[in-house]
Image (cartoon, rainbow, N blue to C red):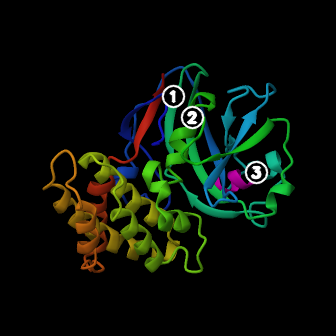
């Protein structure tokens, strides 16, 4: 199932070092008044179970914390003035709350696009920096919970218990893990989990994107197009920093081509449409346009993917 949650989305607002050049990740939402404001990190731990199903660990909060008692959440905490970066804050919180060392026990997978939302029930405006780490086999035995959490549990990534979640968890997860049908595209899952020797490379990114775009991700035209664009965003965001520009230069013209194909479809995709897409993608070549031109096109293609959840109802 697609991730859902009790969150109302509004205009995009997200910035990070590798998305700052795209306007779709840098607009500003209006701020709520009379609320405590806090910048926080939230880290997901991901793995595959014995059957090969991708799973995410969620940690149930105790009654000793000030917010979201007994709700499932990430390993989270505030960004302190002494933290050089949000990633440093995430690593510190992981060590404090699980005893896991992010550099030796875990593998950083990606940084999700940051966002802000208001939870009036908790009287907070949260600015969230999501992260995803892979937990290698055998590392789980090193987990020791602190006072913040009473237990944790692994869930299939597309079957998280929404009514039992702290605010913002659904939105954070969709920023680091491909949602809905995308999470079942094997090449994309392997790419995001960095399970192959060439994980993070241009070829691996393209292979993951092409497989996703060649799948029947949804019957409806608009939902299929949204998921394909999300696949493009995830392969770019999970690529090695040194090749992100090249990945963007290949994925963006591919999406532009796919857009021309999908615009000719009715509300429900024609039978075999995804096979046509897979065939046409074989002719896509790396874009040689100026970086600014590619970024401008990326802004148009990705701009409405990260509508920010401004307020929890």
Instruction: Looking at the image, tell me whether mark 2 or mark 1 is earlier in sequence order.
Output: 1
Which residue is nearer to you in this view: 105 or 209? Answer: 209
Front residue (pair 223, 44): 223
Q: Which residue appears at 39% of the width and 55% of the height?
A: 230
Q: Secondary structure at mark 2?
A: strand
Q: Compared with residue 150, is residue 213 higher up or lower down, i.e. above or below?
A: below
Earlier sequence position, callout 2 versus callout 3: 3
Considering only order in the chain, which callout, 3 or 1, is on the residue closer to the N terminus? 3
- Residue holding disc 1: 118
What span is in magenta?
85-91
Q: Of residues 246 and 198, which is closer to you in this image? A: 198
Determine the image quadrant of residue 261: bottom left
Q: Is residue 222 magenta?
A: no
Q: Is 270 in front, or is 26?
A: 270
Q: Which residue is mark 2?
A: 126
Q: Residue at x 70, y 59 (%)?
A: 50
As drawn, which residue projects farthest toward the left?
264
Q: Which residue position is annotated with label 3? A: 94
Residue 259 place in picture, x, y as percent: 21, 59
| Displayed quadrant of residue 253 | bottom left
* Image quadrant in which you'd find residue 251: bottom left
> Is residue 85 among what the camera can see?
no
Looking at the image, residue 7 lies above or below residue 190: above
Between marks 2 and 3 in the image, the one whose residue lies nearer the viewer: 3
Name the residue located 47 percent from the left edge and 76 percent from the top edge.
204
């Amino acid at each position: 199932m697609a991730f859902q949650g009790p969150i109302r989305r509004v205009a995009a607002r997200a910035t990070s070092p590798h998305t700052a050049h795209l306007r779709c990740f840098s607009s500003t939402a209006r701020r709520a008044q009379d609320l405590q404001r806090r910048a926080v990190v939230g880290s997901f731990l991901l793995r595959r179970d014995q059957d090969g199903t991708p799973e995410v660990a969620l940690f149930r909060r105790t009654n000793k914390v000030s917010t979201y008692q007994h709700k499932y959440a990430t390993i989270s905490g505030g960004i302190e003035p002494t933290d050089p970066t949000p990633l440093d804050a995430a690593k510190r919180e992981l060590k404090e709350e699980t005893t896991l060392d992010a550099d030796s026990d875990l593998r950083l997978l990606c940084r999700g696009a940051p966002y802000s939302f208001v939870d009036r029930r908790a009287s907070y405006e949260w600015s969230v920096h999501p992260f995803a780490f892979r937990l290698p086999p055998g590392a789980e035995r090193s987990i020791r919970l602190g006072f913040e959490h009473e237990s944790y549990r692994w869930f299939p990534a597309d079957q998280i218990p929404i009514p039992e979640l702290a605010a913002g968890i659904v939105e954070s997860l969709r920023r680091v893990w491909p949602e809905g049908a995308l999470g079942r595209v094997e090449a994309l899952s392997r790419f995001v989990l960095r399970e192959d020797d060439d994980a993070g490379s241009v070829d691996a990114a393209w292979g993951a994107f092409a497989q996703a775009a060649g799948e029947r991700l949804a019957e409806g035209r608009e939902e299929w197009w949204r998921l394909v664009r999300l696949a493009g965003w995830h392969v770019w965001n999970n690529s090695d920093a040194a090749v992100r520009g090249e990945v963007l230069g290949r994925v963006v013209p591919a999406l532009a081509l796919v857009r021309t194909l999908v615009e000719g479809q009715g509300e429900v995709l024609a039978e075999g449409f995804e096979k046509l897409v897979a065939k046409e993608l074989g002719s896509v070549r790396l874009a040689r346009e100026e970086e600014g031109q590619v970024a401008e096109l990326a802004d148009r293609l990705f701009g409405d993917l990260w509508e920010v959840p401004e307020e929890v109802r």
